[in-house]
Image: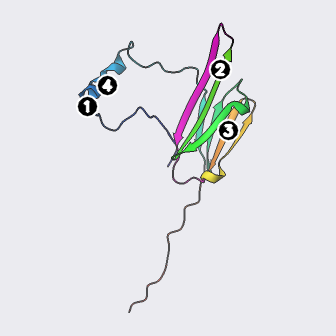
Amino acid sequence: MSLIKYNPNLSPLFSNFDDLLSIFDTFDPMTRPVQSVTGPRTNVQNLEDKHLIELATPGVEKEELNIDIDEGRLTISFDQQSGDENSRFQRAFKRSWTLPKDVDIDSINADYKNGVLAVSIPKIAPAAPPQRRIEIG
């Protein structure tokens, strides 16, 4: 099993008729939600012994990044506000992935070098199925 990017807006079923009709809004450029083009580039690898997530975050300090695990989801976020009374500037991003069941959550670690955040998620070796001999009575 591999990592799946979490999207809270997706729903497996339509809750009412308006939701069903809203699917046509995706073809209308005036009502389509704006996609962020300023988010960090992400590379996700499923290696033999671990999952590796790499984010390019140039200009972001290590102390400003947040990595959280909640209800089986790993979330990487950043929120920076600056400016004065005349102008305000905000940069933010948030990305989430659903963690598979074969990972060791307690051994997840992160490293930040040269504007690249690397999060290593070790896999747990699958347990061998129990074996035993049953005596015939």
Dot 2 corresponds to which residue?
81
For label 1, the crowd category at 10 Å Cα-Cα, with few meaning under 14, some 14 to 19 and many 20 or more, is few
Mark 4 or 1, nearer chain start: 1
Q: Which residues are magenta?
A: 84-104
For label 4, the crowd category at 10 Å Cα-Cα, with few meaning under 14, some 14 to 19 and many 20 or more, is few
Mark 2 or 3, nearer chain start: 2
* Position in image of residue 129 (x %, y %): 50, 69
Q: Is residue 124 magenta?
A: no
Given the image, on which type of amino acid does mark 3 rest?
Answer: Ala
Question: Which residue lies most toward the front here?
Answer: 85
Q: Are the two marked residues, 4 and 1, in contact with CB atoms closer than 8 angstroms? A: no
Given the image, on which type of amino acid does mark 1 rest?
Answer: Asn
Residue at image x 72%, y 33%? 63
Q: Are the two marked residues, 4 and 3, in contact with CB atoms closer than 8 angstroms? A: no
Mark 4 or 3, nearer chain start: 4
Q: Are the two marked residues, 4 and 2, in contact with CB atoms closer than 8 angstroms? A: no
Q: Nearer the viewer, mark 4 or mark 2?
A: 2
Asked whether 43 or 77 is in front, the reply is: 77
Q: Nearer the viewer, mark 2 or mark 3?
A: 2
SS under mark 4: helix
